[in-house]
Image (cartoon, rainbow, N blue to C red):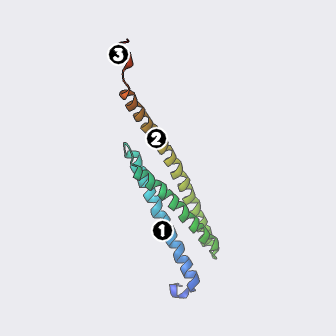
Amino acid sequence: MVCYTSDIPKAEWSSQQTQNVLFNSALRQSTAIRKDLDAFVEASSPSPALLGQINASLTSFSRTIDDYNKLAKQEIVATKQEKAFERLKTFRAELADYREQFGRLRQVNDEMVWRSRTQLALWQLPVLWEQPCG
């Protein structure tokens, strides 16, 4: 039997559509975060804009997952709800992995920036021991 959207009650149709939209949005966000993290790794000195973009993307991805979770809990069909919960597990695992990866990358970047600033400061110190006393 073929089921058309006109056969589905309007309230259920909009919920299904919203859930599909959120799922597709989460997939796109996950892909974008992965690309941004790869760009972060490849950059010798990542820009603050990239850091902010990744941070904002992680927050947005988290909110999308939360919204998808709310709709999954409201799903009436048990198999669809189960499938949605499996997708949520995957999304949450990806988010945790991305946050951990971003934290490690950011820490390494911060250490590199600190070292370069320290070296620059040392080069700028006057050489006191070469100046004659007195």
Q: Position of residue 50 (x, y in %)?
A: 41, 52
- Would you say residue 29 is visible in this rendering? yes
Q: Which residue is drawn at 50% across and 62% down?
A: 60
Is label 1 or label 3 in front?
A: 3
Q: In the orientation shown, which residue stands out farthest toward the front?
A: 134
Q: State the CA–CA distance, disc 2 to disc 3.
A: 35 Å
Q: Earlier in the sequence, mark 1 or mark 3?
A: 1
Three-letter code for the amino acid on which mark 1 is drawn: Asn
User: Residue 104 or 123: which is nearer the viewer?
Assistant: 123
Q: State the CA–CA distance, disc 1 to disc 2.
A: 34 Å
Q: What element carries label 3?
A: loop
Quadrant where the C terminus is found in the figure: top left
Q: Are the two marked residues, 1 and 3, in contact with CB atoms closer than 8 angstroms?
A: no
Query: Does residue 63 lie above or below 45 as drawn?
Result: below
Q: 10 Å neighbourhood of mark 3: few (<14), some, or many (≥20)?
A: few
Three-letter code for the amino acid on which mark 2 is drawn: Asp
Q: Specify the label residue 24 is tagged with.
A: 1
